[in-house]
Amino acid sequence: MAGEAQFGGQSVLILPEGAQRLLGRDAQRTNIAVACAIGNIVRTTLGPRGMDKMLVSEMGDIVITNDGATILEEMNVEHPAAKIMVEIAKTQDKEVGDGTTTAVMLGGELLKRAGELLDQDIHPSTIIRGYKRAAGYCEKILRNISYKVTLEDTETLEKIASISMGSKTVGFGNVKDKLGKLVVSAVKQVAERKDGKVVVDDDFIKVEKKEGGDIDDTQLINGVLIDKEVVHPGMPKKVENAKIALVDSALEIEKTETDAKIEITSPEQMEAFLKQEEKMLREMVEKIAASGANVVFCQKGIDDVAQHFLAKKGLVAVRRVKKSDMEKLAKATGAKVATSLDDLTAKDLGYAGLVEERKIAGEQMVFVEKCKDPKSVTIFVRASTEQVVNEGERAIVDGIGAVSSAVEEGEYVAGGGSIEMQLATELRKYATETGGREQLAIQAFADTLEIVPRTLSESAGMDVIDTLAELRTRHKRADGRDAGVDVYNSKIADMKKLGVIEPTKVKTQAIASASEAAAMLLRIDDMISAKARMPAGGPGGPGGMPGGMGGGDYE
């Protein structure tokens, strides 16, 4: 029985009743089966001809996507091995923003191939060593065969952005090219050079979305879009050549939590008390006006009386702006966030060519645009429905991640499964030079990499065996390293000439994450789940009898 140990002929109970335990090959087989299942779920979403998944939550919310990270996150998996596969997608998404499907697919396939090797009595440690050597060799090959790209190479970067969005619902026709141009413009605007390297902080590219309209209406705003409205109807709705104050203090009288008691015994005292409050609020507004500001963004609240005084001065005010938006406004306008009104001076103000409140899809939004060399910009995504606009946002985020990775690393490779075929070809040569059983693991790693061109050819309706055979032949030739699957024309073609290119970092990260996750799961030979299962009929079993008499395990 699981959780029992034998000592001196007696059984000793170690784990609680209902605990589960899987030992040796059973544990390995279970983990491999789960990982393969996760990999197969996302596999059909790969590439421009990939299909979407519809996910319905417990609350009935619908998500339609083919983004690997989103699918796995929304699936709400329970098995611990499945959760590790989800972590691969999250890591890939966080590090490079693209290639999540590839990473998860490779992880599942590596474990499937490892299962075949385990059946041949090859020890897990041998497989893990082989996988580690193969992953390291792949990284070395990638560095040697990558092409160079710089921040100034706009055309190449636009191709990278376009390809990263190609598999999404919104990535058809000229739309992905237009979105690619927006993404590259945004990345180039916020990119900064530090110690001779290009650094891109994706946090300063805000992606705002609003359904209603068409995906073609998506635009790049050289500034920040705030999803708030102007606080007072008497304030101007449009200000040109705006001088912007960013205030991180409340424009209202602080109500302390102490047990102070104010005793008012006459109407005159009441009036004096109210006048004092009014005077304090008026002084706050005077301090803002004295700085020369004509637009105020406040992180905290603005009192109704203060709103009135601001409106009388002709100032535009927006309240309860998120801290992240305040940081973006500071980067875009050059303003400094003032924590106290006493410290607010003309030097702290930022500049924007236009601040305007506009009604978008029935809601008021404040546009801060035409900034001078803003280091924070906004991509405003529009689409017809909530599902499409969400997928548009995911496509933009993927594009930003891909272009940022290409700019920071300065390297890219050909896509369409060509780089995976080249790595597989090189790994097979490397395997023959490696002695011992590890070469079998390296060959398995090479076979795993071929899952990418295999899947692309399947989705394009091509003959998989013929396609892989021809690709292997092409990649053995000196001029065939960029040969991949042209899914639009269902044939093999030179991917670099077609403009199908991807950042090198997407591939290195996917291979590293997949191989490490596979190694982690292969090391497990014992799974102990100490969570006791609830007896049928609830904690007390049927009829609430102690110990759940007559009840079975709740499956």
Image (cartoon, helix red, strand yellow):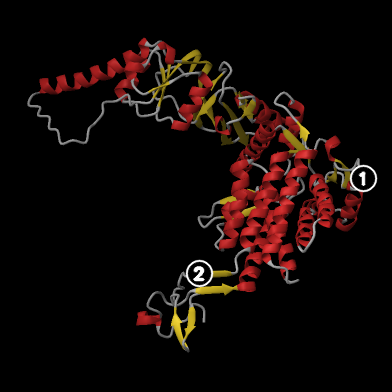
Q: Amino acid at mark 2?
A: Ser
Residue 171 visible within the image: no
Whole-percent x, y for residue 92 in the image: 63, 46
Taking 416 as reference, is 242 left or right?
left
Whole-percent x, y for residue 505 in the image: 69, 40
| Nearest to the observer: residue 502 or residue 518 | 518
Q: Quadrant of residue 76?
A: bottom right
Disc 2 from disc 1: Cα separation: 52 Å
| Nearest to the observer: residue 119 or residue 339 | 119
Disc nearer the start of the sequence (2/1): 1
Residue 197: numbered disc = none
Whole-percent x, y for residue 280 in the image: 25, 19
| Nearest to the observer: residue 138 or residue 529 | 138
Q: Quadrant of residue 205?
A: top right
Taking 243 as reference, is 483 left or right?
right
Q: Residue furthest bottom?
A: 9
Whole-percent x, y for residue 391 in the image: 63, 42
Above or below for 233 versus 41: above
Q: Residue at x 84, y 40 (%)?
A: 495
Would you name the residue on which mark 1 appears? Answer: 477
Taking 537 as reference, is 173 left or right?
right
Would you name the residue on which mark 2 appears? Answer: 529
